[in-house]
């Protein structure tokens, strides 16, 4: 048995502490992937964040909107029927841990 377990602690050496922005983004991603619709401002507000903290996600959605895979109206994002197979691509737009320049299309495969 490890010393950490014997001392009543979890046997982990590292991790990532999530902040309010991380939790809001996780919920946005979950809502988009399960319901195909999300009100980004509502999720930001639940975590005492301004919706503007999520604008980077919207920048990545523009190509999907142009291709008819998403509809965006203010802070409201809706995946169209044609876009449902690509919902992971849309959700990835809100993942702040997905490195910029990383192939975004691969997350949908």
Image: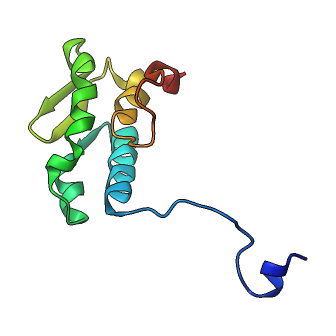
Which of the 4 image quarters holds residue 65? top left
Q: Position of residue 62 (x, y in %)?
A: 21, 21
**Foreground of the two, 100 or 52:** 100
Q: Quadrant of the C terminus?
A: top right
Q: Position of residue 51 (x, y in %)?
A: 16, 51
Q: Residue at x 37, y 35 (%)?
A: 91
Q: Position of residue 61 (x, y in %)?
A: 26, 26
Is the residue 45 above or below the residue 100 in the image?
below
- The residue sitting at the right extreme is 1
Is the residue 68 above or below the residue 28 in the image?
above
Which of the 4 image quarters holds residue 23? bottom left
Colour mode of the rendering: rainbow
Which of the 4 image quarters holds residue 92? top left
Left or right, residue 96 beside residue 6:
left
- The residue sitting at the bottom extreme is 7
Q: Quadrant of the N terminus?
A: bottom right
- So how many labels did they put on this image? 0
Q: Residue at x 25, y 44 (%)?
A: 38
**Foreground of the two, 16 or 65:** 16
Is the residue 42 above or below the residue 48 in the image?
above
- The residue sitting at the left extreme is 74
**Foreground of the two, 28 or 80:** 28
Q: Residue at x 86, y 75 (%)?
A: 2
Q: Position of residue 41 (x, y in %)?
A: 16, 51
**Foreground of the two, 35 or 10:** 10
């Amino acid at each position: 048995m490890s010393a950490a377990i014997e001392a009543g602690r979890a046997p982990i050496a590292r991790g990532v502490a999530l902040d309010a922005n991380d939790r809001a983004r996780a919920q946005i991603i979950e809502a988009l992937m399960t319901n195909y619709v999300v009100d980004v401002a509502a999720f930001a507000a639940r975590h005492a964040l301004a919706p503007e903290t999520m604008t980077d996600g919207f920048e990545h959605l523009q190509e999907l909107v142009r291709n008819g895979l998403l509809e965006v109206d203010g802070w409201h994002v809706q995946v169209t029927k044609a876009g449902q197979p690509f919902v992971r691509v849309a959700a990835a737009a809100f993942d702040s841990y997905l490195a910029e320049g990383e192939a975004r299309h691969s997350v949908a495969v």
